[in-house]
Amino acid sequence: MTDSLRYSHGQIVDLKKYFRKDSTTYGYDWIVPKYDLNFVLRDNSIGIIRYCIEIRLDEYGQILYSNWPKKYYSDKTSFKLRENIEKFAIKQAVLKGFNTKEYLVDFKFNDKFDKLCWIFEFPVLVDSNKKEYNAFEIDWNLADIVEEYYVKQSIVY
């Protein structure tokens, strides 16, 4: 998919200077990367309008973090079509009794399962102060529900 990938931005962190300025870095829940690289993937043929890929590397070039799975996501011909995943999602939502008249669709990396997932949120309540959704994430490779959850959003003005 390299033909659909473009470099966006990045930075090289001066770790010695960084640690001198902030001695509390040992308490962080994450490792400060030496290299912070960001790319944008755009490929309408696979349903991706815009997905930002983040790669964090240590000073030796070892990957500390990436929001792209380590395996099984390099051949776009193996991905399920977005339309088929959407049909599957709606079918599952109907079986669960969810409201399918209007729903939200997003795409994200599920780092807990190391998978790229399509997220479908079906509204339970939408008013001026809050929004609530029944949601599930569907694995892009297998067209299988990876996670199911309830989303509550308060609207702040």
Image (cartoon, grey):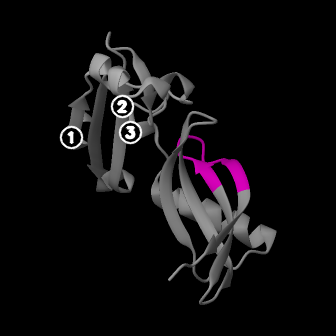
CA–CA distance between discs 2 and 3? 20 Å
Pointer 1 residue? 9
Does dot 1 land on a helix, a strand or a loop?
strand
Give the residue drawn at x 70%, y 49%. 147
Give the residue drawn at x 67%, y 71%. 133
The image shows residue 92 at horizontal and vertical percentages of: 72, 63
Mark nearer the N terminus (3 vs 1): 1
Horizontal side of 128 relative to 74 (left or right) equals right
- Residue 89, located in which quarter of the rendered image? bottom right
Give the vertical position of 147 relative to 10 (above or below).
below
The image shows residue 152 at horizontal and vertical percentages of: 68, 69
* Residue 16 visible, this orientation: yes
Pointer 2 residue? 55
Q: Does the magenta stretch include residue 146?
A: yes
| Magenta segment | 137-148
Give the vertical position of 22 relative to 157 (above or below).
above
Across the whole image, how many numbered discs are drawn on residues? 3
Amino acid type at circle 1 is: His
Give the residue drawn at x 38%, y 56%. 47
Horizontal side of 68 relative to 49 (left or right) equals right
Does dot 2 land on a helix, a strand or a loop?
strand
Asked whether 104 or 89 is in front, the reply is 104
Callout 2: few (<14), some (14-19), or many (20+) C-alpha neighbours within 10 Å?
some
Please give the label number shown on residue 76.
Answer: 3
The image shows residue 34 at horizontal and vertical percentages of: 31, 21
Give the vertical position of 42 relative to 26 (above or below).
below
Horizontal side of 137 relative to 12 (left or right) equals right
* Residue 31 visible, this orientation: no
